[in-house]
Amino acid sequence: MEKGNEPSKRLIVINSSLKQIMLSALELESQTTLHCKIRGTEIYQHGGWANINPNTFLINRHSNERLKLIHAENIPYTPHRYFFRHPNDFLYFTLLFQKIPETWADFCLYEETPFGDGFFVGEVPKNKSGIYRIRIN
C-alpha cells in the first residue's frame, strides 16, 4: 500500500434499539422453538383447560440429557389456566428451549407435573432450523 492510502479507522455507533434487535435475532438462532397446537377435549363440556408447567423439558431419549424450558408464549404458566370455549377449540402457543446439541438425532417433549398428567410428545426428529411444529394430544 502506498502512503496516504491506508484504510481509515472508523467508529461505528449502533443505535441501542437496533442493537437489541440484533442481539434478539442472535438469541433466536441459538435456541429451539416449538410452535404447538392443542385441542380442547370432548370429555369436558367446554373443552377443559391448558397451561404449562415451568418444569417442561426436551429430552434426548438415548442419553436422558434435558434442555429446560426458557419461555412460553400464549399459554399461561401453572397455576394459571387457559379455558377452551368448546371441545373443538384450539390453542396455539410457542415454547422456547436451549439449542438442541448436535449429537441429538431426535427428542421428546415432556412436561413434568405433580399429577403425572403433563404433555408428552415422543421422538420428534431433529432438523437443521431448530423450529418445529407439533400437535399435542
Image: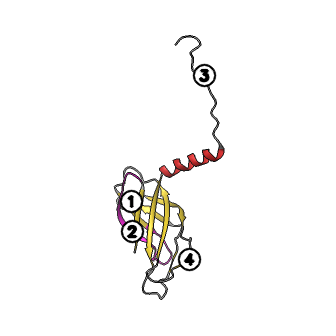
Q: Is residue 114 magenta?
A: yes
Q: Which residue is mark 1?
A: 60
Q: Label 4 belongs to which residue?
A: 81
Q: Give the image's coloring scheme.
A: secondary structure
Dot 4: what SS?
loop
- Name which residue lies at 56% across and 71% down: 76
| Residue 121: mark | 2
In percent of the image, x 54 and y 11: which residue is there? Answer: 2
- The magenta region covers 110-129
Categorize mark 4 by other alpha carbons within 10 Å: few (<14), some (14-19), many (20+): some
x, y percent for residue 85? 51, 82
The answer to which of marks 1 and 4 sits earlier in the sequence is 1
- Amino acid under disc 4: Arg
Mark 1 in CB contact with mark 3 (< 8 angstroms): no
Task: Locate the C terminus by quadrant.
Answer: bottom left
What is the three-letter code of the residue carrying label 3?
Ser
Question: N-terminal of the two: label 1 or label 3?
Answer: 3
